[in-house]
Amino acid sequence: MSHSPVSLLYKRWKLLFLFGCIFGVLAGGMTFLFPLEYRADAQVFIISQSQQGVDPYTTVKSAERIGENLSELLKTDDFFVKVSNQDGYNLDVSEFTSLNDRKRRKLWEQSVHGSVVYGTGVFSISAYHRSQEQAKALAGAAANTLVANGWQYVGGDVIIRLVNPPVVTQYPVRPNLLVNIVLGFLFGVLFISVFVIRKR
């Protein structure tokens, strides 16, 4: 008597769960083979000094567009140099300067991210590092660079103000242990499901 795939999998749910757990544990264990990084987040407010008669909606949309441009400019070599030259943050950029241009740019793009909080004019800066102190310093220096030098990228009719100084996560966030475990579990369940169905 043949069984439908669903009933067959239901009958073998313990086996599916077991293999899901095994793959989940393996995926979680592999997370620790990579450097664990903390994240620090800071926020600035983009103020577009628009002409009189421009409605608030248009002003916010203008700030969002500026923020989208800044999120790309954060990845550039020029911005990296400006951040590196910020005083008072005790930044250690040796891991960047020891690399060739291509590898340094790739590492910098992975280390600093920018994103727009749509509908608000707020721009978020996230920095990643193995050290909590360096992650916080990097986010702070990046935010201060935008405040002090942002006009060079977006023009003099825009003001950028720091509204939230950097705050660092209590635990590492990258690689994401929980996500890796869940993905490993799902992969294990899928793998053994295919095996069970093909062997029926």
Image (tube, helix red, strand yellow):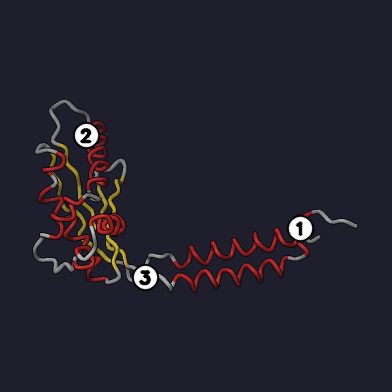
Above or below, 151 relative to 124? above
| Quadrant in the picture for residue 37 | bottom left
Per the image, label 3 sits on a secondary structure element best described as loop
- Disc with the residue nearer the chain's start (2 vs 3): 3
Give the residue at mark 3: 36
Q: Which residue does the image show at 43% across and 64% down from the upper left?
A: 176
Q: Nearer the viewer, mark 1 or mark 3?
A: 1
Above or below, 55 relative to 10? above
Q: Residue furthest front?
A: 100
Give the residue at mark 1: 198
Question: Do callouts 2 and 3 mark residues in contact (Cβ within 8 Å)?
Answer: no
| Quadrant in the picture for residue 190 | bottom right
Would residue 2 be found to the left or right of residue 193 on screen? right
Q: Position of residue 22 (x, y in %)?
A: 60, 72
The residues bearing labels 1 and 3 have C-alpha atoms spaced at a distance of 39 Å
Give the residue at mark 2: 59
Q: Which residue does the image show at 50% across and 71% down from the upper left?
A: 28
Question: Do callouts 1 and 3 mark residues in contact (Cβ within 8 Å)?
Answer: no
Q: Nearer the viewer, mark 2 or mark 3?
A: 3
